[in-house]
Image (tube, coloured by chain):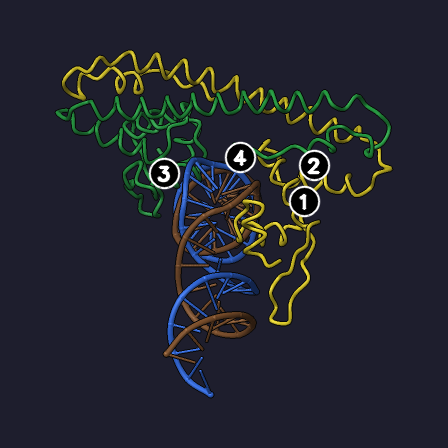
Chain colours: A green, B yellow, C brown, D blue
Amino acid sequence: MKIGELSKVTGCSVQTIRHYEKEHLIASAERSEGNFRLYDEAAVEQLLFIKHCRSLDLSLPEIRQLLALNRSPGAQCDDVNRMMDRHIEQVEARIQELTRLNEQLRMLRRSCSNRRTVEQCGILRNLSATPVSSG
Amino acid sequence: MKIGELSKVTGCSVQTIRHYEKEHLIASAERSEGNFRLYDEAAVEQLLFIKHCRSLDLSLPEIRQLLALNRSPGAQCDDVNRMMDRHIEQVEARIQELTRLNEQLRMLRRSCSNRRTVEQCGILRNLSATPVSSG
DNA sequence: ATAAACTCTATAACAACTATAGAGTCAATC
DNA sequence: GATTGACTCTATAGTTGTTATAGAGTTTAT
């Protein structure tokens, strides 16, 4: 299987697959006589694993760590759990942050009721006046 | 006021201020004899405006647009409103996405109850098995 | 032989900074 | 007057996870 077919089967773009190889998320592929990368079913499964992790917003280094653990089945899985917990924490923190942000944005948006000119626009006036609390 | 003081007053780093100048978010500063940037109170206010917008996750191009509108007080403020509405939509979409993500992560996390080895770890098994729905 | 479709490597772009190197400026001290 | 330290300058590279491009080579079909 050449890289184009692997791309179709997995839904990862060709460049992304090459990128994952460069980042050592997948092993360097065997090459054909003409220097084309050749893949098998194991590559498909590994790419789908990676894709699933990415859909959960796990970073490439995190995925690399999971793959390493996956290759050493005797290892403790505490590490996996710690990583997941940390990741869940991050996601929840981000949700809270965005929720606060959303409230501020809606409040700001209400301050302009489509008056005619920018001069009277509450949004811009508020953006100028309101103190900054770095979020 | 030199760039270091502006940085302290506004809480923006020196590099960020220079970056904003390069990106035309603030005007090119006057220079001293020794080629140091010199700022006044107007620069402070503009930087704080930018910082406030950034804390609301507005992009630099969006901020550039707001600043342009701010400079032409006769302009209609429909544009400001449209931008805010679009931005609020984006933030809300992202919150929904992360909330779904969080549910999946928690479900996954529950599948490992600290059994001994990675081989028995439900998290890794599920990551391998579960079909991917690109989020 | 040639064209189309594919692949290769290397490099740049995206966003919004942050960090670094190497040089220049300024005020104060010895 | 030389030197030290704190500051500033420009230019460049790094961050993250791709995507896009250029220019070349390979394979398959006509």
* CB within 8 Å, label 2 to label 1: yes
Q: Which image quarter: residue B61?
A: top right
- Of residues A38 and D14, which is closer to you in this image? D14
- B110 vs D3: above or below: above
For marks 4 and 3, give the one nearer the viewer.
4
Pointer 4: what residue? A134
Residue A108 at x, y percent in the picture:
68, 25
Residue drawn at the location 16% of the way across and 24% of the way down:
A76
x%, y% of residue A68?
A: 23, 32
> Tag 4: residue type?
Ser
Residues tagged 4 and 1 counted as in contact (Cβ below 8 A): no
- List x then y, in percent, for residue A35: 34, 47
Packing grade of label 3 (10 A; few <14, some 14-19, many >=20) is some
Quadrant assignment, res B60 = top right
The residue at 31%/25% (across/down) is A45
Residue that badge 2 annotates: A128
Residue drawn at (31%, 22%) of the image: A85
Of callouts 3 and 2, the N-terminal one: 3
Q: Which is more toward the observer, C21 or A32?
A: C21
Marks 4 and 1, Cα distance to the nearest angstrom? 16 Å
Name the chain under label 1: B
Q: Amino acid at mark 2?
A: Ser
The residue drawn where x is 12% and y is 25% is A74
Q: Which residue is mark 3?
A: A20
Same chain shared by disc 4 and disc 3: yes
